[in-house]
Image (cartoon, grey):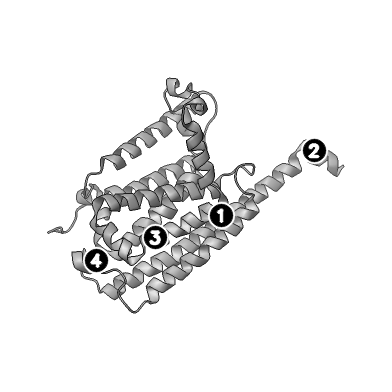
Amino acid sequence: MPDSAPTWITVLAPWEFYPSVVLVSLVTVTLYIRGLRRLRATGHSVGFARSLSFFVGVAITYAVLHTRFDYYAQYLFFAHRLQHLVLHHLGPFFIALAAPWSVLAAGLPQRLRDVNWGALPGAWLIVGGYRILQFPPLAAFLFVGIIFFWLTPSIHFYAMLDLKLYHLMNWSMFLDGLLFWWLILNPSPQQGPSFGWRIIILLAIMVPQILLGAYITLSESTLYDIYAICGRAFPIAPAADQMVGGVITWIPPAMMSAIAILVMLSYIRRQDLASVRSPGALSSAA
């Protein structure tokens, strides 16, 4: 544990250096910036709000994985729950809301953009696996199930002791969150379930998350002994640590679903306006 109070430098510096986090972050941001420049050069600009959403998502994901915050996430239960709130909800939500895939593709080197990826050997496995993971009932089940899995006390105990398992836990939360939120926030009504079904999915995932958070918050026994064994980052009663962590598991995820429902309603309104303005709608109305 640290011997002195952290400064801004030590707060922003990684607690442990993870090459995978640095590499993925640098490559992603570089491709996005290159893509923005190329699209603007061809007259296809990307809105400021979309770009801001993307960079916010990447920044907060990096912050909980590769700054001093990662230390607190390993030695405080409520900090761990904050970390996973960002990895599974906030970070992927902002990234998916930005719909950055066309920008990232534009940032690729020309020789990679010219490759027919669908014709490569084994590409059908990737496409097929993606479609399976994006099957709405399975996506919703995995989104909730992975939270329950890693918060199972016996599994959580070993995940916080084994560094490789700890990384697997964090990356699986982020990737699952990215897949789920793209399924929900994809602005195209032709891709994925209808906006109405997406609202139903968002309502469905709220219930188990609320129940799990309430169970952790109101539990009279200590569910996660690992933080007592390894020691906490600063003095806090185990019951208080668990209660705050439970509240973080309980309320913010439900709020994220509510916010996503508002986004769906805005998509529905935009779709209705587009249908009214289309020539076919106008002629049929006449």
Earlier-in-chain disc, 2 versus 4: 4
The secondary structure type at the circle numbered 4 is: helix
Q: Amino acid at mark 3?
A: Phe
Q: Are marks 2 and 3 in contact (CB under 8 Å)?
A: no
Earlier-in-chain disc, 2 versus 3: 3
Q: Nearer the viewer, residue 165 or 185?
A: 165
Which residue is located at x 45 percent, y 66 percent?
251
The secondary structure type at the circle numbered 2 is: helix
Q: Position of residue 177 (x, y in %)?
A: 45, 51
Q: Are marks 1 and 3 in contact (CB under 8 Å)?
A: no
Q: How packed is label 1: few (under 14 Cα within 10 Å), some, or many (20 or more)?
A: few
Q: Quadrant of the N terminus?
A: bottom left
Mark 1 → mark 3, Cα distance in angstroms = 18 Å
Q: Quadrant of residue 214?
A: bottom left
Which residue is located at x 19 percent, y 64 percent?
230
Q: Which mark is residue 227?
A: 4
Q: Amino acid at mark 1?
A: Pro
Earlier-in-chain disc, 3 versus 4: 3
Mark 2 → mark 3, Cα distance in angstroms = 50 Å
Which of pointers 2 and 3 indicates the residue nearer the eye? Answer: 3
Q: Amino acid at mark 2?
A: Gly
Mark 2 → mark 4, Cα distance in angstroms = 63 Å
Q: Quadrant of residue 238?
A: bottom left
Which residue position holds label 1?
137
